[in-house]
Image (cartoon, helix red, strand yellow):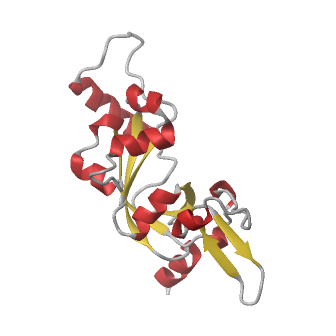
């Protein structure tokens, strides 16, 4: 059975999804894989073994291939006739300094307001800094804004330097509400 879970995305990442530039996301594994209690640095072989073992024995909280993620993003909704929903990512520069609209934080976006559904095609565990140049582009990075810069903006410099284990998710993007997507798929 297909499961649908929410996932938070920042305005720049929502724009990358809408533009077709983002087909991957990385999220920190919790808890982090541990292969021994020693403090020695891992070599590449032990790293690969630890990542594979973690993935084999730990269920990815974001789902498995075939599952869906519905994107939560900042928005404002007006109950008027007809109802109107404005998404911050579409007009970030227009609303950045505007007090007229009180955008709801992405964490509070209800399922009915979502407009992007991600269909997971691959799940793997890897070290953050093992992200290949091709994967960095699939993360929504651009030549003038490398992936490391994007990660540090969202998660902090210390997180990049720590090189944590991450869930690397690959997906197809559907510009459709998750419930509408599920109805269309079952029809």
- Residue 47 percent coordinates (x, y): 29, 27
Q: Does residue 52 appear left or right of residue 102 in this picture?
A: left
- What residue is rendered at 43% in x and 37% in y? 57
One can see residue 52 in this view: no
Image x and y of residue 88, in percent: 59, 65
Q: Nearer the viewer, residue 110 or 185?
A: 110
Vertically, is 165 above or below 101?
A: above
Determine whether 134 is above or below 41 in the image: below
The residue at the far bottom in this view is: 81
Residue 76 quadrant: bottom right
Q: Which x, y percent locates residue 29?
A: 47, 37
Q: Is 21 displayed left or right of 111 in the figure?
A: left
Residue drawn at point x = 43 percent, y = 70 percent: 18
| Left or right: residue 13 compared with residue 85 | left
Where does residue 90 sit, x and y in percent of width and height? 52, 70
Side of 160 where 84 appears, left or right: right
Q: Residue at x 64, y 66 (%)?
A: 75
Give the tally of numbered discs: 0
- Is residue 131 placed above or below 70 in the rendered structure? above
Q: Quadrant of residue 157?
A: top left
Observer able to see residue 135: yes
At horizontal 71% and vertical 73% (from top left) the residue drawn is 77
């Amino acid at each position: 059975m297909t499961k649908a879970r929410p996932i938070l995305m920042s305005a720049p990442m929502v724009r990358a999804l809408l533009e077709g530039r983002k087909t991957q996301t990385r999220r920190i594994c919790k808890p982090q894989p541990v292969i021994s209690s020693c403090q020695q640095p891992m070599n590449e072989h032990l790293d690969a073994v630890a990542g594979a073992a973690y993935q084999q024995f730990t269920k990815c909280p974001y789902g498995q291939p075939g599952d869906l993620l519905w994107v939560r993003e900042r928005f404002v909704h007006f109950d008027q006739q007809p109802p109107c929903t404005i998404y911050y990512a579409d007009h970030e520069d227009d609303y950045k300094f505007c007090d007229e609209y009180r955008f709801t934080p992405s964490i509070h976006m209800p399922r009915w307001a979502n407009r992007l559904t991600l269909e997971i095609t691959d799940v793997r565990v890897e070290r953050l800094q093992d992200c290949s140049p091709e994967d960095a582009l699939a993360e929504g990075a651009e030549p003038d804004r490398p992936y490391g810069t994007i990660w540090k903006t969202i998660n902090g410099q210390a997180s990049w330097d720590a090189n944590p284990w991450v869930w690397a998710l690959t997906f197809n993007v559907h510009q459709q509400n998750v419930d509408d997507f599920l109805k269309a798929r079952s029809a």
